[in-house]
Image (spheres, rainbow, N blue to C red):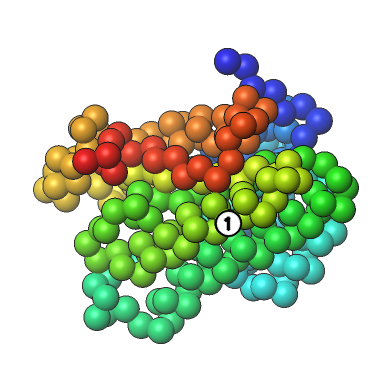
Amino acid sequence: MEINFSGKRALVTGATKGIGKDIATQLSKCGAKVVAVGRTKQLLGELKKELPSIEIVELDIADWKQTENVLKNIGPIDLLVNNAGMGWLKSLLDATEEDVDSVFGVNIKALINVTKIVVQNMLDRKVPGSIVNISSQASIAGLLHHTVYCASKGAVDSFTRAAALEYGPKNIRVNAVNPTVIMTDMGRLGWSDPKVAKPMLEKIPLNRFGEVREVTDAVLYLLSDKASMITGVCLPIDGGFTAI
């Protein structure tokens, strides 16, 4: 099934590494004009060298006002991937106010702000649009020592459904994907120890962790016209973890 985004302009947050980088790369390969947003100038520069056609924007989306100022003049956007996210591995009693503010500040507050700006962009131009939020299996199942992260991703799923309801009549689709552990560079580092990986793998019927491209492929599908009747969905990409 060929997916073609020629004539479309896509904004991807957290686009400098891992899943976000692969999404930006594959969108570009499928013909989209990609705007890659990231916090780190060096990583943005490296991405630009790899893919000269990509437009890079250095921005900390946790800064509400700066995000408004930068993105309000970003130009036409047809596709949005809210990929930027963060989390702490801590027990509830060890979580601080700063932990809660930082995780919610990026995972849901910034996501809402970016989505708000892009939806307004689409409405002003009277065009259809497609948005995919990168959520997590942590929004569906409780994960040990992920209380704050789980709460933030639960908010992402709820926001996805509500935004889909609100803007469906304008032909703006809003969906989410909910990955399990994905073998990014960070994922390989954190889950390479069999003792750490075994308890999680035992809960995944496919008995393996996910690969980056398996998330990207689902995102590309949901962004595309192939998914034109799909909105308000939170799609697990978890090998069956949340099915049992």
**Pick the front one: 17 or 142:** 142
Q: Give the position of the N terminus as an image quadrant.
A: top right
Apparent side of residue 80 relative to residue 216 in the rendered image (left or right): right
Q: Give the position of the C terminus as an image quadrant.
A: top left
Residue 140, x across and y down, in percent: 34, 52
Residue at horizontal 72%, vertical 28%? Answer: 5
- Which quadrant of the view contains residue 24? top right
- Which quadrant of the view contains residue 150? bottom left
Residue at horizontal 59%, vertical 61%? Answer: 111
Residue 154, x across and y down, in percent: 42, 60
- Judged from this view, the residue extending furthest toward the right is 125
Apparent side of residue 151 relative to residue 166 in the rendered image (left or right): left
Apparent side of residue 65 relative to residue 41 in the rendered image (left or right): right
Q: State whether residue 109 is above or below residue 190.
A: below
**In this view of the protein, can residue 29 be seen by the observer?**
no
**Pick the front one: 241 or 22:** 241
- Judged from this view, the residue extending furthest toward the top is 1
Q: State whether residue 161 is above or below residue 206.
A: below
Residue 203, x across and y down, in percent: 18, 42
Residue 158, x across and y down, in percent: 49, 58
The amino acid sitting under disc 1 is Ala
**Pick the front one: 157 or 59:** 157
Q: State whether residue 190 is above or below residue 67.
A: above
Residue at horizontal 54%, vertical 36%? Answer: 219
- Judged from this view, the residue extending furthest toward the bottom is 97
- Which quadrant of the view contains residue 172? top right
- Label 1, on which residue? 162
Q: Secondary structure at mark 1?
A: helix
Residue at horizontal 47%, vertical 77%? Answer: 101
